[in-house]
């Protein structure tokens, strides 16, 4: 049995929220993200949109009327990067810009029908990839993943909550809600 299949006695004694679990989960999530990107590009090689553009579209789909600054904060991107992405998406007819209801000087973003279609197609491609991959797993692993879905959903909410915590000041890099770690 591989070391990652079953925790060692010392890991089991520390409990499920141990540092080792965090390290293993971070590695698995990073590997899964890379694998999904590769598989999505292989499944839909004609998709001209970058992952960053698709992420902006997904954020606008979840928050119609959001301002570019909010999207930048949510994606942890520089505002000028989001402006560049939005400009490219607008030029492709995927995002509409209107005046914000509360401030006519501000821009509010929404998807056009083509933008909605792009998000739906991206989600469908990702769903098809995951369904095909799940079909390659034995029943025990399929069941384990199904059983883990509620915990994964809560973990996603917890990570989102960490992203909303204002950064602490002081120390190298200003410090933040999460201790500094390697960037992938």
Image (cartoon, rainbow, N blue to C red):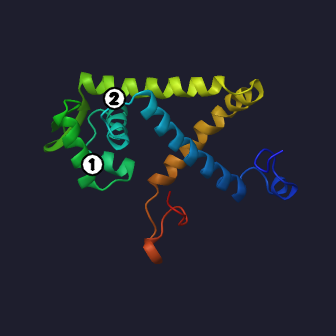
Residue lying at 46% horizontally and 68% vertically, measured from the top left: 168
Q: Tell me the element at label 2.
A: loop
Considering every residue shown, the one lying at the far left of the view is 105
177 up-or-down from 59: above or below: below
Q: Is residue 96 left or right of residue 66?
A: left
Contact, mark 2 vs mark 1 (Cβ under 8 Å): no
Q: Quadrant of the N terminus?
A: top right
Residue 152, image x, y percentages: 62, 38
Residue 71, image x, y percentages: 32, 45
Give neighbour class at mark 1: few <14, some 14-19, many 20+ (Cα, 10 Å): many
In the rendered image, which residue does mark 2 sit on?
46
Nearest to the eye among marks 2 and 1: give it: 2
Q: Is residue 36 left or right of residue 72?
A: right
Q: How many numbered tags mark residues here?
A: 2
Residue 8, image x, y percentages: 84, 54
Q: Nearer the viewer, residue 37 or 164?
A: 37
The quarter holding residue 58 reads top left
- Let me know if residue 170 appears in the view: no
119 up-or-down from 104: above or below: above
Q: Is residue 143 left or right of residue 127?
A: right
In the rendered image, which residue does mark 1 sit on?
82
Considering every residue shown, the one lying at the far right of the view is 9
The quarter holding residue 50 reads top left
């Amino acid at each position: 049995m591989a070391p990652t299949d079953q925790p060692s006695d010392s890991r089991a004694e520390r409990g499920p929220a141990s540092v080792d679990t965090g390290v293993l989960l971070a590695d698995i999530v990073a590997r899964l993200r890379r694998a999904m990107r590769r598989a999505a590009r292989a499944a839909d090689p004609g998709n001209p949109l970058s992952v960053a553009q698709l992420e902006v579209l997904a954020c606008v789909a979840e928050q119609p009327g959001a301002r570019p600054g909010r999207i930048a904060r949510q994606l942890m991107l520089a505002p000028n990067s989001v402006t560049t992405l939005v400009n490219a998406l607008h030029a492709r007819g995927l995002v509409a810009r209107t005046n914000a209801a509360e401030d006519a000087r501000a821009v509010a973003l929404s998807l056009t029908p083509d933008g909605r279609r792009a998000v739906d197609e991206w989600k469908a491609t990702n769903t098809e990839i995951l369904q095909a991959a799940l079909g390659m797993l034995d029943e025990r692993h399929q069941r384990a993943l199904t059983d883990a879905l509620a915990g994964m959903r809560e973990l996603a909410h917890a990570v989102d909550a960490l992203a909303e915590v204002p950064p602490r000041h002081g120390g190298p890099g200003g410090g933040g809600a999460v201790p500094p770690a390697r960037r992938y």
